[in-house]
Amino acid sequence: MLYTGLARHSGMHMTEAILEVTRLAKMYDQALAVDAISFSVHRGEIVGLLGPNGAGKTTTLNMLLGVLEPTAGTIRIAGFDVHKERSRALARTNFAAIYAQVPGNLTVFQNLYIFGLLYGVADLRARMPGLLHEFELDAFRNTKCGLLSSGEQTRVHLAKATMNRPRLLLLDEPTASLDPSAARIIREKIRSFATDDGMGVLWTSHNMHEVEAVCDRVLFLSHGKVLLAGDPRTLPQAHGKQNLEELFITVAREPLSLELE
C-alpha cells in the first residue's frame, strides 16, 4: 500500500509528491531489515518515521540518501529515480542528524562555506551573511564548531542542510540533545521550512510529544514493515490508546496486537 497525505499546516489542497518510495527492501545476508515498504512525502508536509531501535528507520534513511543500495524497490525524489538519476535526485536532498557532525576544528563560516562549495550553491559568498543571520549564527561566525553548545551545533547542521534549498529534508533525531527551549526553536524553524519554503520533511524521533506537535503524518515501522500510518493526533485513539507515546510502546512491545486489530 502506498501511503499518501496532504500537509495539515500548509493550507494547500493538492501537493506534489517530493518523495515516493515503492516496495523498498533491504536484506543483510538472511536478515530482512526493510520489508517492501511504500510511502510518500509531499511538498510542505512533515512526516514522522517512527519505531523502536532496530525497526529499519536508519536503514531506510541511508537508502534514501544513496548510502545503501536497496535489495529491491524504487525511490523517487522530486520525480528523479535515485538508482537511475542519482546526482539529480540527491542534489534536491539534504540531511541533518546530531551524530553527523561537521568538522569541529573549522569555524562556522568555514564549514558552511566548504559545504556550500560541495553543494554547488550559487553566489555562495554573497549568500553567506544571510545564511548566518537566518540561523542566528552571526556571533559564532569565527568560532570553531567543536566549541559550540548542542543547540548552536544543531543550528549549524540545519544551516548546512538547507543551504542548497533541498526539496526533501531528512532529519534523524535533530533535537535529541537539546533542552526544551532550544528544541522548540528548532521545531519552529523546521516547521517554517515546510510551510514557507514548501520542503518535504521526513523526521525520525523518539520524542512523541514533539512528533505530535510538528508532524502532519506518521509512519510506524516494526520489523522493517510499515505497521501503522496516519495523523499523530488521531491515530492513538483509533487503536485504543490514549496518546502517541502509549501507541509507540505498544508498537515496540506488542506489534502483533495491532496487526490483529
Image (cartoon, rainbow, N blue to C red):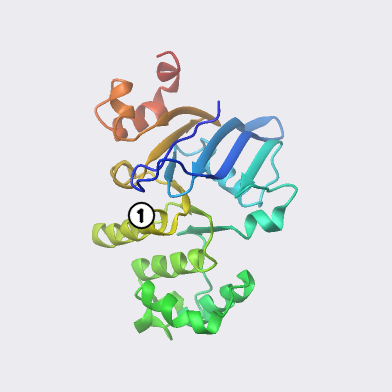
Q: Is residue 96 left or right of residue 81?
A: left
The secondary structure type at the circle numbered 1 is helix
- For residue 164, above or below residue 259: below
Residue corresponding to mark 1: 191
Q: Residue at x 69, y 40 (%)?
A: 70
Placement of the N terminus among the 4 image quadrants:
top right
Q: Is residue 184 left or right of residue 49?
A: left
| Outermost residue, right side | 84
Q: Position of residue 19 (x, y in %)?
A: 56, 45
Q: Is residue 38 visible?
A: yes
Q: Position of residue 238 (x, y in %)?
A: 32, 22
- For residue 133, above or below residue 54: below
Q: Position of residue 189 (x, y in %)?
A: 35, 61
Q: Is residue 107 visible?
A: no
Q: Position of residue 129 (x, y in %)?
A: 43, 82
| Outermost residue, bottom side | 142
Q: Hey, what amino acid is under mark 1?
A: Arg
